[in-house]
Amino acid sequence: MIRVLLADDQALIRAGYRMILDSEPDMEIVAEAVDGRQAVELARTERADVVLMDIRMPVMDGIEATRRIADDDDLAGVRVLVLTTFEQDDNVMLALRAGASGFLGKGVGPDELITAVRVVASGDALLSPKATRGLLDHLLSQPEAGPPPAALDELTQREREVLVLVAHGLTNDEIAERLFLSPLTAKTHVNRAMAKLRVRDRAQLVVVAYQSGLVRPGNPQPK
C-alpha cells in the first residue's frame, strides 16, 4: 500500500487529489497538510511513502519543506512529488536540488497523477515534459557547478554510461536493452551511481549529469 500525504493550502485541490487517489486499491491518503511546516511534521508522524507537495504555500513553502524532508535521515524513504502551476521557472531546479523525486503540472489528468505517484513510490524520478524543458533552460543559463571531479572519478565506465542514459530519460529496462544487460544489473549500476554520488534518487542523478558536464543540453542520446 502506498501511503500518500497531501500538502496544498487549497482545500478544493486536496479534495480532488483525495478523490482520485483514494479510488486506487494500492493507495491510501494518510493525512492532509495546509502548509509546508505541517507537511514536514505529518511526514514524520504519518510515515508517508509519497508527499504530493504544492510549492506556493503559507508559513513554509513547498521547496523548503521538501528540503527538510530530504535532509531528515529518519525520512529517507519518503519521496516528494511536486505539483504546481509553474513548470518552466527556477522552481524546477530548486525543487530537484531540495530533494524532490518528481515534478508535475497541476493540469495533469487523473491517470497521469496515479502513474506519477506509483513511479515516484518505486524510487524512480518523474519530470513532466514542461518541467524537463524548464530544467534544461535553467542549466543552459547557469555556469557549470557540479560535484567535484573526484566524485565522478569514483564511477566505473559502465556506471558513467548508465548515468548518461538516466539523464536522457531511459528507464532501467530501456538501459538494460541498450547495454545488453539484465534489468536487475542495470538497476544495480544505477543504485551504485547514486551511492557514489551521494544522491537520493534518479532526479538528482539527472541534475548531476548535466551540472557536471557529463551530459549537455542539446546533445543527442547515445546509441
Image (cartoon, rainbow, N blue to C red):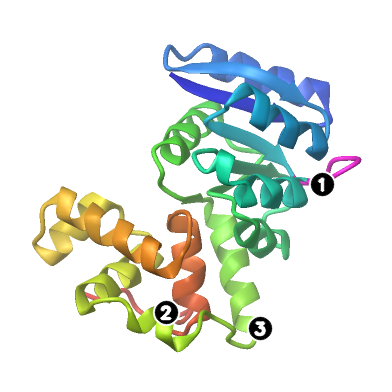
Range covered by the magenta-colored residues: 55-61
Q: CA distance from mark 3 to mark 1?
A: 24 Å
Q: Amino acid at mark 2?
A: Ala
Q: Residue at x 60, y 77 (%)?
A: 139
Comparing labels 1 and 2, the label whose residue is closer to the camera = 2
Q: Quadrant of residue 136?
A: bottom right
Of residues 10 and 184, the one nearer the viewer is: 184
CA neighbours of label 1 inside 10 A, class few (<14), some (14 to 19), many (20+) = some
Decide if residue 168 is in sight here.
no
- Residue matched to label 3: 142
Q: CA distance from mark 3 to mark 2?
A: 21 Å
- Residue matched to label 1: 61
Asked if marks 1 and 2 touch (Cβ < 8 Å), the reply is no
- Residue matched to label 2: 151
Q: Main secondary structure of the magenta part?
A: loop
Pick whichever of labels 3 and 2 is earlier in the sequence: 3
Q: Residue at x 54, y 61 (%)?
A: 132
Q: Position of residue 185 (x, y in %)?
A: 16, 55
Dot 1 lies on which element? Answer: loop
Residue 178 position (above or below residue 79): below
Comparing labels 3 and 1, the label whose residue is closer to the camera = 1
